[in-house]
Image: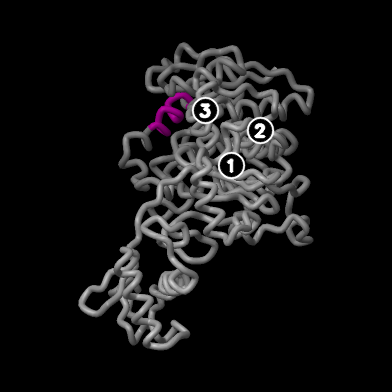
Amino acid sequence: MIKFIDLFAGIGGIRLGLENALDEFGIDHRCVLSSEINRAACDTYKLNFNEDPYLNVKKIDENQIPDFDFLLAGFPCQPFSYAGKKSGFADTRGTLFFDIERILKKKEPKYVLLENVRGLFSHDGGRTLQTIKRSLETIGYSVEIRILNSSDYGIPQNRVRLFIVGCLGVSTKLNLVSSFGVKDTHSYNAASEQLKLFSKSNLITVSDILEKNPPVNFDCSNSFNRMVKSAVDGDLNKIHGYRLIDYRGGKSLHSWDLGLKGTCNKDEREFMNLLIQNRRQKKFGVDQDGKKLTKEQILTFYPHSSDKFENITTSLLNKGYLKNWDGRYDPVCGNMSFEVFKFLDPNRISVTLTSSDTGRLGVFYNNRLRRITTREAARLQGFPDTFKLNDNINECYKQFGNSVSVPVISEVVKDIIKNN
């Protein structure tokens, strides 16, 4: 029997990964304490584990915790995240690690498994992670650190996370090798022989987790559908992998592609896209950040006549897509808030799920332009279809954006068991 506690439990992803691994080895297990302060997450946790984990870790009396063998903690990632302010232990949430330390000192479980964002690895020049490592070693734990990408473990999501494993009183051994995985979602190819060499599971893509006939409430609105279809010249199959953003080139749809301030013809869209793609070139000056360019500078990459330049820029200035600052042209970029901000490519993997944007990931599949469903969000984190979802759709998206990839946890736990 392995007894464990589940701190910063969320909806129970780390617990589920641990239990799946122990079940595979035929090892009995029991959770003796769980702790989570988000009420909606607690509701989902209770729905699936028949336990209400609503408890602030700071209020846990370590003297009252039953003895246990394994401490699990996906402690708050915001202080170390690239998406946050990266304030680390200067942030009060960062100091929640020291509640883990307090419990470990008193109870001395055999194993500890901590999960966090990749930003913890390099935060403050690596000093934050070293502080955590030294704290665990002072208590008596031998520590191993791994960086793993969910896409290497049969999950069609480019999600890189850091794992800290500690064993009390003995040298910690792990066979898993750190890997950041693919560079980005566009470079992922399920047929790649190189990827097959390093993957721990069958390589799958977004198409493998999509529902065949999801409820119509996930479909994009008719007006948004028409807007996107017009931007891709009537062929929605072109939308795979595209973002809706003004500030970047590449596979992006912009306000001028969508006609937000007025319809733009092909020539006008070409001009704006070339300007976005080239304005950051260093030859135009780092002090300008490539944002404001003269006519002469633009004509170095705009492959048309000066007269056409004048006609196009005049039209774009009148529509509000372009500004002229004392002879320098600057695209007018806005924050576009639509039903979908990124369309996944069914033949690739998903971008990293986040708490704020999971509900705005879309897909064109089976001739439907829609958001991914909450069940698909769960599948993108490796949760089984037996896992019960929160009735609040928005909370559900947030929960899976905040959660862990269950199969990755299982592989880490199995590696611990096999080698220790």
Q: Nearer the viewer, residue 381 or 114?
A: 381
Q: Earlier in the sequence, mark 3 or mark 2?
A: 2
Q: Is residue 222 above or below residue 188?
A: above
- Point out the frontmost of discs 3 and 2: 2
Horizontally, residue 336 falls left or right of residue 287, namely: right
Mark 1, secondary structure of its residue: strand
Separation (CA) of disc 3 from disc 2: 14 Å
Q: Secondary structure at mark 3?
A: helix
**Residue occupied by mark 1:** 370
Query: Which label was assigned to residue 214?
Result: 2
Counting every numbered tag in the picture gives: 3
Q: Position of residue 361 (x, y in %)?
A: 54, 44
Is any atom of residue 140 visible in this view? Answer: no
x and y, in percent, of residue 98 in the image: 40, 32
Mark 3 and mark 1: span between their CA atoms?
Answer: 15 Å
Which-is-in-front pick, marks 3 and 1?
A: 1
Disc 2: CA contacts within 10 A as few (<14), some (14-19) or many (>=20): some
| Residue drawn at 42 percent across, 33 percent down | 97
Label the magenta part by its dominant secondary structure. helix
Q: Check disc 2 and report its element: helix, strand or loop.
A: loop
Residue at 61% over, 46% down: 363
- Magenta residues span 96-104
Say which amino acid is labelled 2: Pro
Q: Amino acid at mark 3?
A: Ile
